[in-house]
Amino acid sequence: MSFDSLGLSAELLRAVAKQGYGTPTQVQSQAIPLILAGHDLMAGAQTGTGKTAAFTLPVLQNLMASGANGSRRVRALVLTPTRELAAQVSDSVRSYGRFLPLRSAVVYGGVNINPQMKALRAGVDVLVATPGRLLDHVTRRTVDLSKVEILILDEADRMLDMGFMPAIERVLREIPAQRQTLLFSATFADNIKKLAGRLLREPKLIEAARPNAAAEAVTQAAYFVDSERKRELLSHLIGTQNWRQVLVFTRTKHGADRLAKQLEKDGIQAAAIHGDKSQGARTRALAAFKRQSVRALVATDVAARGLDISHLPYVVNFDLPHNPEDYVHRIGRTGRGGQSGEAVSLVCAEEGGQLAAINRLLKCEIPAEVISGFEPQRRVVTRRPRTESRGRPHGGGRSAQDTRGRPGGARRKPGGRNAARS
Ligand code: AMP
Protein backbone atom coordinates (compact mmCIF):
# COMPACT_ATOMS: atom_id res chain seq x y z
CA MET A 1 0.00 0.00 0.00
CA SER A 2 1.36 3.42 -0.92
CA PHE A 3 0.10 6.95 -0.35
CA ASP A 4 -0.50 7.29 -4.11
CA SER A 5 -3.32 4.77 -4.01
CA LEU A 6 -5.35 6.55 -1.33
CA GLY A 7 -6.84 9.23 -3.56
CA LEU A 8 -4.87 12.19 -2.21
CA SER A 9 -4.09 15.19 -4.39
CA ALA A 10 -0.64 15.92 -5.82
CA GLU A 11 -0.06 18.79 -3.36
CA LEU A 12 -0.75 16.55 -0.38
CA LEU A 13 1.40 13.73 -1.78
CA ARG A 14 4.24 16.20 -2.18
CA ALA A 15 3.84 17.31 1.43
CA VAL A 16 3.81 13.68 2.58
CA ALA A 17 6.98 12.96 0.60
CA LYS A 18 8.63 16.04 2.07
CA GLN A 19 7.74 14.72 5.51
CA GLY A 20 9.69 11.59 4.61
CA TYR A 21 6.84 9.10 4.95
CA GLY A 22 7.14 6.14 2.59
CA THR A 23 4.06 4.08 3.33
CA PRO A 24 0.83 4.94 5.11
CA THR A 25 0.27 3.53 8.57
CA GLN A 26 -2.66 1.22 9.20
CA VAL A 27 -4.99 3.94 10.44
CA GLN A 28 -4.01 6.16 7.51
CA SER A 29 -4.75 3.57 4.84
CA GLN A 30 -8.08 2.79 6.47
CA ALA A 31 -9.24 6.28 7.37
CA ILE A 32 -8.11 8.42 4.43
CA PRO A 33 -10.37 6.89 1.72
CA LEU A 34 -13.38 6.90 4.09
CA ILE A 35 -12.92 10.54 5.05
CA LEU A 36 -12.37 11.54 1.42
CA ALA A 37 -15.66 9.80 0.57
CA GLY A 38 -17.37 12.06 3.11
CA HIS A 39 -18.19 9.48 5.76
CA ASP A 40 -18.39 10.15 9.46
CA LEU A 41 -15.79 8.11 11.27
CA MET A 42 -15.20 6.58 14.66
CA ALA A 43 -11.58 5.54 14.90
CA GLY A 44 -9.84 3.65 17.67
CA ALA A 45 -6.29 4.94 17.42
CA GLN A 46 -3.75 6.07 19.95
CA THR A 47 -1.05 8.65 19.62
CA GLY A 48 1.81 7.10 17.74
CA THR A 49 -0.34 5.36 15.14
CA GLY A 50 -0.14 8.24 12.67
CA LYS A 51 -3.69 9.35 13.43
CA THR A 52 -2.98 13.05 12.99
CA ALA A 53 -2.06 12.64 9.33
CA ALA A 54 -4.92 10.15 8.99
CA PHE A 55 -7.44 12.92 9.52
CA THR A 56 -5.47 16.02 8.51
CA LEU A 57 -4.62 14.94 4.95
CA PRO A 58 -8.17 14.04 3.83
CA VAL A 59 -9.69 16.97 5.74
CA LEU A 60 -7.44 19.42 3.88
CA GLN A 61 -8.38 17.76 0.60
CA ASN A 62 -12.12 17.91 1.40
CA LEU A 63 -11.78 21.60 2.19
CA MET A 64 -10.06 22.21 -1.14
CA ALA A 65 -12.81 20.29 -2.92
CA SER A 66 -15.64 22.17 -1.25
CA GLY A 67 -14.37 25.44 -2.65
CA ALA A 68 -12.91 28.72 -1.56
CA ASN A 69 -13.79 30.35 1.69
CA GLY A 70 -14.59 33.90 0.74
CA SER A 71 -15.66 34.80 4.27
CA ARG A 72 -12.63 33.05 5.78
CA ARG A 73 -14.76 31.60 8.52
CA VAL A 74 -13.67 28.37 10.21
CA ARG A 75 -14.48 25.37 8.01
CA ALA A 76 -12.70 22.58 9.87
CA LEU A 77 -12.49 22.48 13.65
CA VAL A 78 -10.16 20.11 15.51
CA LEU A 79 -10.72 19.76 19.26
CA THR A 80 -7.91 18.30 21.36
CA PRO A 81 -7.63 17.75 25.12
CA THR A 82 -4.28 19.45 25.78
CA ARG A 83 -2.37 22.50 24.67
CA GLU A 84 0.60 20.41 23.62
CA LEU A 85 -1.51 18.19 21.42
CA ALA A 86 -3.24 21.25 19.93
CA ALA A 87 0.15 22.76 19.08
CA GLN A 88 1.32 19.50 17.53
CA VAL A 89 -1.82 19.01 15.46
CA SER A 90 -1.54 22.60 14.31
CA ASP A 91 2.08 21.99 13.23
CA SER A 92 0.90 18.96 11.27
CA VAL A 93 -1.86 20.96 9.58
CA ARG A 94 0.75 23.48 8.54
CA SER A 95 3.22 20.85 7.28
CA TYR A 96 0.69 18.80 5.33
CA GLY A 97 -0.99 21.92 3.96
CA ARG A 98 2.24 23.63 2.95
CA PHE A 99 1.40 23.49 -0.78
CA LEU A 100 -2.26 24.48 -0.34
CA PRO A 101 -3.75 27.97 -0.03
CA LEU A 102 -5.46 27.18 3.28
CA ARG A 103 -5.01 29.10 6.51
CA SER A 104 -4.93 27.62 9.96
CA ALA A 105 -4.71 28.80 13.54
CA VAL A 106 -4.47 27.25 16.97
CA VAL A 107 -6.08 28.47 20.19
CA TYR A 108 -5.45 27.14 23.68
CA GLY A 109 -5.44 28.43 27.19
CA GLY A 110 -2.57 29.61 29.35
CA VAL A 111 -1.42 32.22 26.83
CA ASN A 112 -2.56 35.72 25.89
CA ILE A 113 -5.87 35.64 24.04
CA ASN A 114 -5.28 38.78 21.95
CA PRO A 115 -3.01 37.34 19.26
CA GLN A 116 -5.51 34.49 18.90
CA MET A 117 -8.33 36.98 18.38
CA LYS A 118 -6.28 38.73 15.75
CA ALA A 119 -5.57 35.47 13.91
CA LEU A 120 -9.25 34.54 13.99
CA ARG A 121 -10.26 37.97 12.70
CA ALA A 122 -7.86 37.58 9.78
CA GLY A 123 -9.73 34.41 8.88
CA VAL A 124 -8.83 30.74 9.05
CA ASP A 125 -9.95 27.61 7.26
CA VAL A 126 -8.73 25.16 9.90
CA LEU A 127 -8.89 25.89 13.60
CA VAL A 128 -7.24 23.62 16.17
CA ALA A 129 -8.42 24.30 19.71
CA THR A 130 -8.70 23.06 23.24
CA PRO A 131 -12.35 23.18 24.37
CA GLY A 132 -11.89 25.62 27.27
CA ARG A 133 -10.21 28.40 25.32
CA LEU A 134 -12.46 27.87 22.33
CA LEU A 135 -15.45 28.37 24.59
CA ASP A 136 -13.84 31.58 25.74
CA HIS A 137 -13.72 32.79 22.13
CA VAL A 138 -17.30 31.65 21.55
CA THR A 139 -18.53 33.66 24.56
CA ARG A 140 -16.58 36.70 23.45
CA ARG A 141 -17.92 36.18 19.95
CA THR A 142 -14.41 36.33 18.57
CA VAL A 143 -14.87 33.11 16.59
CA ASP A 144 -17.57 32.23 14.09
CA LEU A 145 -18.28 28.51 13.90
CA SER A 146 -21.42 28.77 11.78
CA LYS A 147 -19.62 27.59 8.65
CA VAL A 148 -17.90 24.53 10.08
CA GLU A 149 -18.08 21.68 7.57
CA ILE A 150 -15.87 19.16 9.37
CA LEU A 151 -15.56 18.58 13.11
CA ILE A 152 -12.74 16.43 14.46
CA LEU A 153 -12.60 15.25 18.07
CA ASP A 154 -9.05 14.10 18.73
CA GLU A 155 -8.41 11.93 21.80
CA ALA A 156 -12.08 12.17 22.66
CA ASP A 157 -11.70 9.79 25.60
CA ARG A 158 -9.18 12.07 27.23
CA MET A 159 -11.35 15.14 26.64
CA LEU A 160 -14.17 13.44 28.52
CA ASP A 161 -11.79 12.32 31.27
CA MET A 162 -10.67 15.90 31.66
CA GLY A 163 -14.22 17.15 32.11
CA PHE A 164 -14.52 19.00 28.80
CA MET A 165 -17.98 17.66 27.98
CA PRO A 166 -19.90 20.81 29.01
CA ALA A 167 -17.53 22.99 26.96
CA ILE A 168 -17.88 20.67 23.98
CA GLU A 169 -21.68 20.72 24.32
CA ARG A 170 -21.66 24.49 24.26
CA VAL A 171 -19.34 24.63 21.24
CA LEU A 172 -21.52 22.10 19.39
CA ARG A 173 -24.46 24.49 19.56
CA GLU A 174 -22.49 26.88 17.34
CA ILE A 175 -21.72 24.30 14.67
CA PRO A 176 -24.08 23.32 11.83
CA ALA A 177 -25.73 19.92 12.25
CA GLN A 178 -25.02 19.27 8.58
CA ARG A 179 -21.33 18.42 8.69
CA GLN A 180 -18.79 15.61 8.62
CA THR A 181 -17.71 14.43 12.07
CA LEU A 182 -14.60 12.38 12.88
CA LEU A 183 -14.01 10.98 16.34
CA PHE A 184 -10.64 9.57 17.39
CA SER A 185 -10.26 7.81 20.70
CA ALA A 186 -7.80 5.38 22.27
CA THR A 187 -10.62 3.47 23.92
CA PHE A 188 -14.29 2.85 23.18
CA ALA A 189 -15.63 3.08 26.71
CA ASP A 190 -19.39 3.49 27.17
CA ASN A 191 -19.24 7.27 27.49
CA ILE A 192 -17.40 7.49 24.16
CA LYS A 193 -19.93 5.24 22.47
CA LYS A 194 -22.71 7.43 23.82
CA LEU A 195 -21.03 10.57 22.56
CA ALA A 196 -20.46 8.97 19.16
CA GLY A 197 -24.08 7.90 19.00
CA ARG A 198 -25.14 11.51 19.38
CA LEU A 199 -22.58 13.20 17.16
CA LEU A 200 -21.92 10.82 14.29
CA ARG A 201 -24.20 9.87 11.46
CA GLU A 202 -23.88 6.34 10.11
CA PRO A 203 -20.22 6.33 11.03
CA LYS A 204 -17.66 3.96 9.61
CA LEU A 205 -15.80 2.22 12.35
CA ILE A 206 -12.08 1.51 12.24
CA GLU A 207 -9.74 0.23 14.89
CA ALA A 208 -6.07 0.80 14.21
CA ALA A 209 -4.52 -0.71 17.26
CA ARG A 210 -6.39 -2.85 19.71
CA PRO A 211 -7.38 -0.56 22.54
CA ASN A 212 -5.40 -1.41 25.64
CA ALA A 213 -2.78 -3.27 23.65
CA ALA A 214 0.73 -2.30 24.61
CA ALA A 215 2.89 -1.16 21.74
CA GLU A 216 4.61 -4.24 20.43
CA ALA A 217 7.95 -2.66 19.62
CA VAL A 218 8.39 -1.71 23.27
CA THR A 219 10.52 -3.82 25.59
CA GLN A 220 9.08 -3.66 29.09
CA ALA A 221 10.71 -4.30 32.43
CA ALA A 222 9.77 -3.73 36.06
CA TYR A 223 12.59 -3.11 38.52
CA PHE A 224 11.72 -3.79 42.14
CA VAL A 225 13.17 -1.20 44.47
CA ASP A 226 12.31 0.52 47.74
CA SER A 227 10.49 3.80 47.17
CA GLU A 228 13.15 5.91 48.87
CA ARG A 229 15.82 4.55 46.54
CA LYS A 230 13.97 5.07 43.29
CA ARG A 231 15.64 8.37 42.49
CA GLU A 232 19.08 6.87 43.08
CA LEU A 233 18.25 3.91 40.85
CA LEU A 234 16.97 6.20 38.11
CA SER A 235 20.17 8.25 38.13
CA HIS A 236 22.15 5.00 38.11
CA LEU A 237 20.25 3.69 35.08
CA ILE A 238 20.52 6.95 33.15
CA GLY A 239 24.24 7.12 33.88
CA THR A 240 25.35 3.50 33.49
CA GLN A 241 23.16 2.79 30.47
CA ASN A 242 23.87 6.18 28.96
CA TRP A 243 20.25 7.12 28.30
CA ARG A 244 20.37 10.38 26.39
CA GLN A 245 16.65 11.13 26.16
CA VAL A 246 14.28 9.71 28.73
CA LEU A 247 10.71 10.63 29.53
CA VAL A 248 9.96 10.01 33.20
CA PHE A 249 6.43 9.79 34.58
CA THR A 250 5.44 10.76 38.07
CA ARG A 251 1.96 10.73 39.54
CA THR A 252 1.92 14.24 40.94
CA LYS A 253 3.02 17.68 39.82
CA HIS A 254 4.91 18.14 43.05
CA GLY A 255 6.66 14.80 42.53
CA ALA A 256 7.67 15.87 39.02
CA ASP A 257 9.21 19.12 40.27
CA ARG A 258 11.03 17.43 43.11
CA LEU A 259 12.43 14.65 40.94
CA ALA A 260 13.64 17.07 38.25
CA LYS A 261 15.49 19.05 40.92
CA GLN A 262 17.04 15.92 42.42
CA LEU A 263 18.20 14.67 39.03
CA GLU A 264 19.82 18.04 38.37
CA LYS A 265 21.69 17.60 41.65
CA ASP A 266 22.88 14.22 40.37
CA GLY A 267 24.30 16.00 37.33
CA ILE A 268 21.53 14.94 34.93
CA GLN A 269 19.97 17.80 32.99
CA ALA A 270 16.25 17.58 33.76
CA ALA A 271 13.05 19.58 33.39
CA ALA A 272 9.51 19.09 34.66
CA ILE A 273 6.38 19.54 32.60
CA HIS A 274 2.91 19.63 34.17
CA GLY A 275 -0.30 21.59 34.33
CA ASP A 276 0.92 24.19 36.84
CA LYS A 277 3.75 25.29 34.57
CA SER A 278 3.13 28.23 32.30
CA GLN A 279 2.67 27.43 28.65
CA GLY A 280 5.98 29.14 27.92
CA ALA A 281 7.83 26.96 30.42
CA ARG A 282 6.24 23.81 29.03
CA THR A 283 7.11 24.71 25.45
CA ARG A 284 10.69 25.58 26.43
CA ALA A 285 11.13 22.33 28.37
CA LEU A 286 9.81 20.25 25.47
CA ALA A 287 12.03 22.08 22.96
CA ALA A 288 15.10 21.59 25.16
CA PHE A 289 14.26 17.90 25.49
CA LYS A 290 13.80 17.50 21.75
CA ARG A 291 17.16 19.05 20.97
CA GLN A 292 18.63 16.89 23.76
CA SER A 293 19.94 19.67 25.96
CA VAL A 294 17.60 18.25 28.60
CA ARG A 295 18.23 14.57 29.18
CA ALA A 296 15.29 13.69 31.43
CA LEU A 297 11.86 15.21 30.96
CA VAL A 298 9.73 14.53 34.03
CA ALA A 299 6.01 14.68 33.32
CA THR A 300 2.60 13.96 34.75
CA ASP A 301 0.13 11.91 32.72
CA VAL A 302 -2.03 14.81 31.63
CA ALA A 303 0.92 16.96 30.55
CA ALA A 304 2.50 14.11 28.61
CA ARG A 305 -0.63 13.11 26.77
CA GLY A 306 -0.11 13.55 23.06
CA LEU A 307 3.52 14.65 23.28
CA ASP A 308 5.00 13.91 19.90
CA ILE A 309 8.68 13.22 20.21
CA SER A 310 9.91 11.14 17.33
CA HIS A 311 12.07 8.14 18.18
CA LEU A 312 11.83 8.55 21.94
CA PRO A 313 13.89 5.58 23.12
CA TYR A 314 13.18 5.40 26.87
CA VAL A 315 10.17 5.83 29.08
CA VAL A 316 10.42 5.39 32.83
CA ASN A 317 7.50 5.00 35.17
CA PHE A 318 8.94 6.50 38.31
CA ASP A 319 5.55 5.96 39.93
CA LEU A 320 3.09 3.48 38.54
CA PRO A 321 -0.16 5.12 37.45
CA HIS A 322 -3.30 4.48 39.50
CA ASN A 323 -5.22 3.87 36.32
CA PRO A 324 -3.72 0.88 34.45
CA GLU A 325 -4.83 2.33 31.10
CA ASP A 326 -2.48 5.24 31.72
CA TYR A 327 0.37 2.74 31.67
CA VAL A 328 -0.51 1.90 28.08
CA HIS A 329 -0.64 5.59 27.16
CA ARG A 330 2.67 6.23 28.86
CA ILE A 331 4.64 3.48 27.19
CA GLY A 332 3.01 4.41 23.87
CA ARG A 333 5.39 7.40 23.88
CA THR A 334 8.17 5.10 22.80
CA GLY A 335 8.54 2.40 20.16
CA ARG A 336 6.97 4.56 17.47
CA GLY A 337 7.30 4.48 13.72
CA GLY A 338 8.92 1.05 13.72
CA GLN A 339 11.66 2.10 16.15
CA SER A 340 12.23 -0.01 19.23
CA GLY A 341 11.79 1.47 22.66
CA GLU A 342 12.17 0.54 26.28
CA ALA A 343 9.71 1.12 29.06
CA VAL A 344 11.06 0.68 32.56
CA SER A 345 8.90 0.78 35.68
CA LEU A 346 10.36 1.35 39.12
CA VAL A 347 8.08 -0.59 41.42
CA CYS A 348 8.11 -0.43 45.21
CA ALA A 349 6.29 -2.59 47.77
CA GLU A 350 3.34 -0.20 47.90
CA GLU A 351 2.76 -0.57 44.15
CA GLY A 352 2.43 -4.35 43.87
CA GLY A 353 -1.34 -4.08 43.41
CA GLN A 354 -0.96 -1.52 40.66
CA LEU A 355 1.54 -3.71 38.82
CA ALA A 356 -0.88 -6.64 39.09
CA ALA A 357 -3.68 -4.51 37.65
CA ILE A 358 -1.45 -3.50 34.72
CA ASN A 359 -0.47 -7.10 34.08
CA ARG A 360 -4.13 -8.07 34.03
CA LEU A 361 -4.94 -5.32 31.53
CA LEU A 362 -2.01 -6.29 29.28
CA LYS A 363 -2.90 -9.97 29.67
CA CYS A 364 0.77 -10.73 30.18
CA GLU A 365 3.30 -10.17 32.92
CA ILE A 366 5.86 -7.44 32.68
CA PRO A 367 9.17 -9.16 33.41
CA ALA A 368 10.30 -8.23 36.91
CA GLU A 369 13.91 -7.82 37.90
CA VAL A 370 16.07 -6.58 40.73
CA ILE A 371 19.14 -4.50 40.00
CA SER A 372 22.17 -5.54 41.96
CA GLY A 373 22.88 -3.02 44.72
CA PHE A 374 19.24 -1.91 44.78
CA GLU A 375 17.63 -5.02 46.29
CA PRO A 376 14.40 -3.95 47.99
CA GLN A 377 14.09 -4.40 51.74
CA ARG A 378 10.33 -4.63 51.42
CA ARG A 379 9.00 -7.36 49.16
CA VAL A 380 6.84 -6.42 46.19
CA VAL A 381 3.78 -8.65 46.11
CA THR A 382 1.58 -8.52 43.05
CA ARG A 383 -1.62 -9.82 44.53
CA ARG A 384 -4.97 -8.53 43.44
CA PRO A 385 -5.89 -5.43 45.42
CA ARG A 386 -9.01 -6.10 47.50
CA THR A 387 -10.49 -2.69 46.83
CA GLU A 388 -10.54 -3.16 43.09
CA SER A 389 -13.93 -4.11 41.71
CA ARG A 390 -13.04 -4.41 38.04
CA GLY A 391 -11.25 -7.26 36.35
CA ARG A 392 -11.23 -10.97 36.88
CA PRO A 393 -9.80 -12.89 39.80
CA HIS A 394 -6.09 -13.37 39.52
CA GLY A 395 -3.79 -16.14 40.62
CA GLY A 396 -3.79 -14.99 44.24
CA GLY A 397 -1.03 -13.62 46.42
CA ARG A 398 2.15 -14.60 44.79
CA SER A 399 5.37 -12.71 44.80
CA ALA A 400 6.14 -11.03 41.53
CA GLN A 401 9.73 -12.20 41.96
CA ASP A 402 8.35 -15.58 40.97
CA THR A 403 7.38 -14.23 37.58
CA ARG A 404 10.89 -14.35 36.19
CA GLY A 405 11.05 -16.33 33.04
CA ARG A 406 7.31 -16.46 32.61
CA PRO A 407 5.98 -15.82 29.12
CA GLY A 408 4.98 -12.37 27.98
CA GLY A 409 7.14 -9.46 26.89
CA ALA A 410 10.77 -9.51 25.91
CA ARG A 411 12.94 -9.44 28.97
CA ARG A 412 16.42 -8.21 29.25
CA LYS A 413 19.24 -8.46 31.69
CA PRO A 414 19.99 -5.61 34.05
CA GLY A 415 22.84 -3.55 32.74
CA GLY A 416 22.84 -5.25 29.38
CA ARG A 417 20.45 -3.12 27.44
CA ASN A 418 21.36 -4.61 24.10
CA ALA A 419 20.53 -8.09 25.27
CA ALA A 420 16.97 -7.98 23.97
CA ARG A 421 17.90 -6.32 20.70
CA SER A 422 19.73 -7.76 17.81
P1 AMP B 1 0.52 10.55 15.59
O1 AMP B 1 -0.08 9.23 15.93
O2 AMP B 1 -0.32 11.33 14.66
O3 AMP B 1 0.87 11.31 16.84
O4 AMP B 1 1.88 10.30 14.81
C1 AMP B 1 2.96 9.67 15.42
C2 AMP B 1 4.26 9.89 14.67
O5 AMP B 1 4.33 9.15 13.47
C3 AMP B 1 4.53 11.33 14.28
O6 AMP B 1 5.87 11.61 14.65
C4 AMP B 1 4.40 11.36 12.79
O7 AMP B 1 5.25 12.33 12.22
C5 AMP B 1 4.79 9.95 12.39
N1 AMP B 1 4.11 9.46 11.18
C6 AMP B 1 2.83 9.69 10.81
N2 AMP B 1 2.55 9.05 9.66
C7 AMP B 1 3.66 8.38 9.30
C8 AMP B 1 4.00 7.52 8.19
N3 AMP B 1 3.11 7.20 7.25
N4 AMP B 1 5.23 7.02 8.13
C9 AMP B 1 6.14 7.31 9.11
N5 AMP B 1 5.90 8.12 10.18
C10 AMP B 1 4.66 8.65 10.26
Image (tube, rainbow, N blue to C red):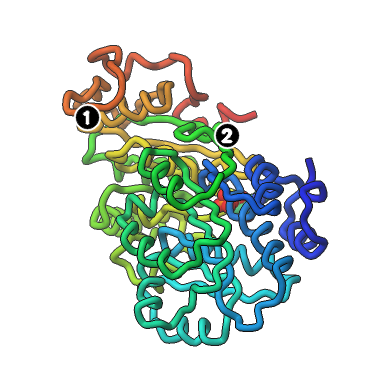
Relative to 338, say whether 172 is above or below: below
Of residues 409 and 156, the one nearer the viewer is 156
Q: Which secondary structure, mark 1?
A: helix
Residue matched to label 2: 217
Disc 2 and disc 1: Cα gap in Å?
28 Å
Relative to 132, say whether 262 is above or below: above
Q: Residue at x 31, y 39 (%)?
A: 323
Relative to 33, say whether 74 is above or below: below
Q: Is residue 239 visible?
A: no
Q: Residues within 10 Å of mark 2 (few under 14, many from 20)?
A: some
Of residues 76 and 419, the one nearer the viewer is 76
Which sits earlier in the primary sequence, circle 2 or circle 1?
A: 2
Quadrant assignment, res 238: top left
Q: How many marks?
A: 2
Q: Amino acid at mark 1?
A: Ala
Q: Percent x, y for residue 22?
A: 76, 48
Q: Residue furthest front?
A: 178
Q: Residue at x 49, y 87 (%)?
A: 118
Residue matched to label 1: 349
The CB of the residue at mark 1 lies under 8 Å from ligand 1: no
Mark nearest the camera among 2 and 1 is 2
Quadrant assignment, res 20: bottom right
Is the N terminus in the top left, top right, bottom left or bottom right quadrant?
top right
